Image (tube, rainbow, N blue to C red):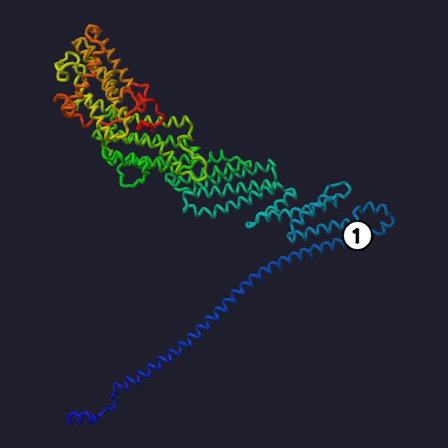
Amino acid sequence: MESSEEEDDLDYPINDGITPQSKIDSIYQSNTEKGIRKLCCELLVLKDAVENLRGNMRTKYLAFLRISDEVVEMEHELIELQKHISAQGILVQDLMSGVCRELEEWNKANGDIHEAQQDPQIGELQDPFPNNIVDAKTIFLEKIDVLLAEHKVEEAIEALDAEERNSPDLKSSGDTSPTEASSYRSAFLKRKAMLEDQLVEITEQPLVGTLELKKALSGLIKLGKGPLAHQLLLKSYGSRLQKSIEAFLPACSSCPKTYSATLSKLVFSLISLTTKESGSIFGDDPAYTNRIVQWAEWEIESFVRLVKENAPPSESISALRAASICIQASLSHCSLLESQGLKLSKLLMVLLRPYIEEVLELNFRRARRVILDLDAIDESFPLSPCFASPLSAFATSSDTMLIDSGIRFMYNVNEIVEQLTPLTILHFGGSILTRISQLFAKYVGVLIKALPGPSEDDNLTELKEDIPFRAETDAQQLALLGIAFTVAELLPMAIWRTQNECKEPGSGPTENIVHTASAMESKEWRRHIQHSLDELRDHFCRQYVLNFIYSREGKTQLNAQIYLNGKGDDLSWDSGPLPSLPFQMLFVKLQQLATVAGDVLLGKEKIQKILLARLTETVVIWLSDEQEFWGVFEDESAPLRPIGLRQLILDMHFTVEIARFAGYSSRHVHQIAAAIIARAIRTFSARGIDPQSALPEDEWFVETAKGAIHKLMSDASDTDDEHIIDEHLIDEHMIMHDEMASDSDDSPSSLSSVESSESFASANMGDLESPTDLTDPEN
């Protein structure tokens, strides 16, 4: 321990060239603190300088603004001073001219004093204008110059008007010297023209006020410049309108649907204001009224041109809404202008009608493309539940694409109708109904292509390749027909409901397209809708009946051979008096179709009955018109027997009883069946068969037909429908089952050209006014 302490106390030699670290730290630490303190002081000084500079800048800036305001005021004072100096200069110049003129006259008067003293009478004749009169005229002209220089137009007008009434020189009386009168009149007219120019300049100022304008125009009228004043009135208000329109046009793109209403308000409100101002200033002078009408017509032409130039694309829904609003707003303004004597509605409609028709046509073309483009099913079409629900009811028995097509049709029609305003409907209701019926016809054409079966149109096969869906089964075909009739049922309701929803509070009774159109147009529209439905029905019935009558191999299942000798696979004579197997098969098929229709067309019993009645009717129509069938009986080599005639008559009675049993008895079926029986009797009689001895009483046929129906029904209650008749009938039925169901017709027209007195929509059930009654017997 002692040794270590001794070592600590030892003094080591220190080299003078080496500075200890502690000394270095103390030196540099003190220098750093001094530098920081110095820097802080400098920053504080700089901060004070900046604050002083900012205060000086603010003070100088305020002073600069004050000086600028003073400079502006000084400029105004200089301008006023220049005007005052100019006015004083004019006064000095006029004074000098007056003094010179007076000196000349004074010198002339002094030179003639001697002559005047010699002959006072002659002097009086040579000096008809006393000096006081000349002085008065000069003073008056000088006064007018002062008023003109000071722009005191009202005082100048009053002075000129008073002078013109009182001065004999300005009235061209014969008491004055022609030279002096002409000189004074020229000076007077010159100042009057200067005043007129000042008034015109006032009216042409861009920011002239209404009161100043009226005063200027009234001054022109007092100066006898009425036509010029009226022209300036129209020019001034036309300029105001142009500026208002130019200020609004850049905003048209931001409000594409309502811009036309704003333009209409600008134009027609200014026309109304101009008419009122013209009446208050110029009165009811016909000349001025005609000019107002001409000017208003020109402004309306410009307005229609602006509407077209700034409209959205014509095929867009915005363009249709803008056009409808334009019609509504413009015609409303025109009706208000009629109280002011301006009838501009006809001109407006003449100018707007081509454009409105173009917009309607392009919008319906767009709708047609959307409806017929069945592949584009991804797009959403939000439709009101009152329209979508009836169509969605077919979802369980139909392809979703078929339902989408109906929803798409209703959505597009509803979208177009929603854009229409009451006055648009009033003037274009008939045209809109026509386009809706044409659109429905195109839609029905697509549905027809979706039905299976051969067609008489060779081109239809190629067209069907583009159809993305097919209605193959009975349920799908019935759903297709149900959708078509549901759309036809919803159309009038959609039009009426849309117009009620678009009605604004306090706008009065709502216009309805169907009811606004003339009775003839409404009837024609319903007829076109019905015609399109009839085309769909005819196509379905034609294919259904042909598939029933002909097999897939093209052989006829219903032919005359089964009535020749009673032998063959199609007729079983040993089973008792029953209808032929084809007619038994017809009964089975109609029963099956009625069962499917009860599920698919639920709640549409009327269509179900009418459909079955129409199909039954179509079978007997074909049998009545088929010449090949009757040619067999007329052939001399064909062996005819009384039993064949009896069987044919029994089949006809059986067909009539089928309709009566199912509750869709048709008078037309009775008529055609009776005609077939009469023709058969004539044909067999011509071949030597006595119908009186060969045929039983009519009651026998009726009872036998009813008994056959009851027998078939009782067999059906014990077994399945597929086992009602023998295996041959089952096989034939199974072959064709997938091709034979889908209809909902209403007019008993023939398969080809046979006409009927009843329509499909009202077969044996009374006439219906519109397609809305086609599906619901309660309506």
> Residue 324: percent from the left, percent from the top?
42, 38
Where 749 sits versus 161, above or below? above
Q: Is residue 267 left or right of residue 179?
A: left
Q: Is residue 438 left or right of residue 252?
A: left
Which residue: 16% across, 14% down? 577
User: Which amino acid lies under the numbered mark 1 shown in the image of this protein?
Assistant: Lys
Q: Looking at the picture, tell me which residue is in the foreground, 217 or 704.
A: 704
- Picture quadrant of residue 578: top left
Where 653 sits versus 444, above or below? above
Total residue callouts: 1
* Quadrant in which the C terminus is drawn: top left
Which residue: 49% across, 39% down? 333
* Quadrant in which the N terminus is drawn: bottom left
- Helix, strand or loop under label 1: helix
Q: Is residue 571 left or right of residue 542?
A: left
- Picture quadrant of residue 604: top left
> Residue 740: percent from the left, percent from the top?
21, 26
Observer able to see residue 463? no
> Residue 125: percent from the left, percent from the top?
82, 45
Observer able to see residue 57? yes
Which residue: 37% across, 78% down? 39
Q: Looking at the picture, tell me which residue is in the foreground, 746 or 440.
A: 746
> Residue 233: percent from the left, percent from the top?
57, 43
- Disc 1 crowd, CA 10 A, few/some/many (<14, 14-19, 20+): few
Q: Looking at the picture, tell me which residue is in the foreground, 406 or 59.
A: 406
Where 490 sits versus 46, above or below? above
Q: Which residue is mark 1?
A: 108
Q: Is residue 457 left or right of residue 216?
A: left
